[in-house]
Amino acid sequence: MSGSRPDLDDVREGVRAVCRPFDEPYWQAVDQSHSYPEDFVAALTDGGWLSVHVPEEYGGGGRGIAEASVVMEELNRSGANGAACHAQMYALWVLLRAGTEDQRSKWLPQIAKGALRFQAFGVTEPDAGSDTPTITTRAVRHDDHYVINGQKVFTSRVQHSDLLLLLARTTPLEEVARRTDGMTLFLVDLRDSEDAIRAEPIRTMVNHETNALFIDDLRVPMEARVGEEGSGFYHLLDALNAERILIASECVGDGRWFIDRSVAYANQRVVFGRAIGSNQGVQFPLAHAHMDIEAADAIRWRAVETFDAGGPTGALANMAKYLASEAAIAAGGAAMTTFGGWGMTVEYGIERKFRETRLYRVAPITNNLVLGYVGQHVLGLPKSY
């Protein structure tokens, strides 16, 4: 599979058209004020791009993760920050694959038309980062509902979302046969949570609305459970694999943005009587970065093809995320060198994008854990963590 498929051209052109009015001054203003790009997300929603992978019978575009990945790539290649809205693109896979027909009929049409925002994903905890089985947020079942107590951290966009996909333990870790058993997923309607969920913003080096959540006696109805009780981690894998693929796509977009901007600047910037792009110290890092992005993109498309076919995607999705994030960081470094002092200024946007793409070396999973996953599950080496 290739991202240059003719049937994806309409997606690319459509997303570019939506992004065009949101230029660098817009993103600089949003970044400097640490505000949420409401009008940008609304424009994407109105265009149907955030529901491109929702089946047509629920009001979506009826496409797959291939089209969703192109949306995220083009957002970032335009200079936007796709992190403002990417959760809906991957969290929806849990509903699509593990939700009941009643849940899909209730939620998907409202999400697709923009009546409900689904941008929040609560998994990580202060003492359980990538070691998900050690989460302590607890959901206790009663006759017709669950009561949930606990804490989450780095729960992004929750203050700009109507729905929260929440992972909690329904069986304590010490009582399960496998560490990954005993966790359950819930789709929480935040409009009904009242004071049971308290969000405290966490300020970061990038404009990324993220929070610590404190959950006290949150009562959710039985129909809020997504999938089987105790199987939440396994249902979650669909979303996590989609997340890795879409983050890889964003990083490919970032990398191409860096390279596009750098090549244009290196061709027109003249020092010592010639364009700086003729100097190997400028040219070679950009050429290297371009090749790395193309290689990461190839793995991204292998992961896309496998995911859309319903095959085992874990290794490819993780490798795509790793390779694309590292390639994007390298492209950002080459851009900073190309622009020299101007790369450090706010005006050109290089420093903003450099900060934004740096996030993906550690999120949604640190690249060291990807290396450990590949070592153990692909190469058959002993567990390293």
Image (cartoon, rainbow, N blue to C red):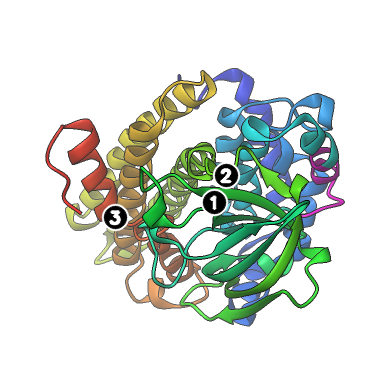
Per the model, the C-alpha gap separating discs 1 and 3 is 16 Å
Per the image, the residue denoted by label 3 is 330
In this view, 157 is above or below 320 = below
Label count reads 3
Comparing marks 2 and 1, which lies closer to the viewer?
A: 2
Please state if 146 lies on the left or on the right of 185 as rendered. Answer: right
**Contact, mark 3 vs mark 2 (Cβ under 8 Å):** no
Q: Is residue 115 magenta?
A: yes
- Dot 3 lies on which element? helix
Per the image, the residue denoted by label 2 is 72
Q: Position of residue 80 (x, y in %)?
A: 59, 57
Q: Which range is magenta? A: 107-117
At label 1, the amino acid type is: Asn
**Contact, mark 2 vs mark 1 (Cβ under 8 Å):** yes
Q: Position of residue 383 (x, y in %)?
A: 17, 45
- Dot 1 lies on which element? helix
Q: Quadrant of the N terminus?
A: top left
Q: Position of residue 265 (x, y in %)?
A: 41, 58
Per the model, the C-alpha gap separating discs 3 and 2 is 20 Å
Residue lying at 47% horizontally and 62% vertically, measured from the top left: 124
The label shown at residue 76 is 1
Between residue 245 and residue 26, name the one nearer to us. Answer: 245
**Contact, mark 1 vs mark 3 (Cβ under 8 Å):** no
